[in-house]
Amino acid sequence: MKFGVVTFPGSNCDQDMLHALRHDLGQEAVSLWHKDHDLQGVDMVILPGGFSYGDYLRSGAIARFSPIMAEVIKHADKGGYVMGICNGFQMLTEAHFLPGALLHNSSHNFICKNIHLTPGMLDSAITADLDMTKAYKIPIAHGEGRYHADEDTLNRLDDNGQVLFYYCDEQAKVTDASNPNGSIDNIAGVCNARKNVMGMMPHPERAATEDLLNADGKILLESLLNHMTTA
């Protein structure tokens, strides 16, 4: 599989993701610039974390108009894979490629710490190899990560199996106390109905090697590799 990681002005996790893909997973990964019009034949586009365009207006609101996003949309429409992490997730909701919105954390503080996730379903590439009774320790680093959607949208997400991850405790129990940012229903990540466009606030690329004393994120990324199919 070939991955493309987009760099926007203000991105700060693009190199983390490139390192995880190349060195921890042994995959081909190229760097894409936000003004590019060529995706270089990648199978998956990754929109990384950071503060694109300084997070002016709303996080991801300006980046979603970058020239490369037109190509990302075409790629996804053809069935290609797209994954947004943190700021990338915000871009995908701003572009209406994923339902819902990311609001300011309920604490109104920037939060940077390890949290725990549990999968909401197993029929997506990133969750297929996971265990729904297990908690996975993954870092978060965001100020606007509170997932919100109206009741009808939440019902559709539930009916279609589009919730990728829930915030949980170390025993994989989804509780109010384990919700770091006030996200509705403890939702930490969602996908589109076709399950080829995925978004999540936590950073698996920051937990992809034992050098960081945590490789739970590598389990998620390896699941992607094992279950992605070419469009």
Image (spheres, grey):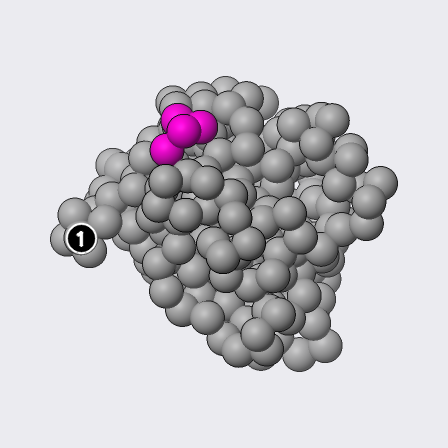
- Quadrant of the image containing the N terminus: top left
Badge 1 is on which residue?
213
| Residue 40 image offset from top left, x and y in percent | 50, 41
From the viewer's side, name the closer residue of 162 and 61. 162
Q: For mark 1, does the 10 Å Cα neighbourhood hold few (<14), some (14 to 19), or many (20 or more) residues?
A: few
Is residue 17 on the magenta stretch?
A: no
Q: Quadrant of residue 141?
A: bottom left
| Residue 196 image offset from top left, x and y in percent | 60, 31
Q: Quadrant of residue 198?
A: top right
At a point 72% along the width and 62% down the height, the residue shown is: 65
| Residue 78 image offset from top left, x and y in percent | 68, 29
From the viewer's side, name the closer residue of 148 and 203. 148
| Residue 56 image offset from top left, x and y in percent | 66, 79
Q: Main secondary structure of the magenta part?
A: loop
Q: Which residues are magenta?
A: 131-135
**Taking 223 as reference, is 62 left or right?**
right
**Taking 184 as reference, is 229 left or right?**
left
At a point 62% along the width and 70% down the height, the residue shown is: 106
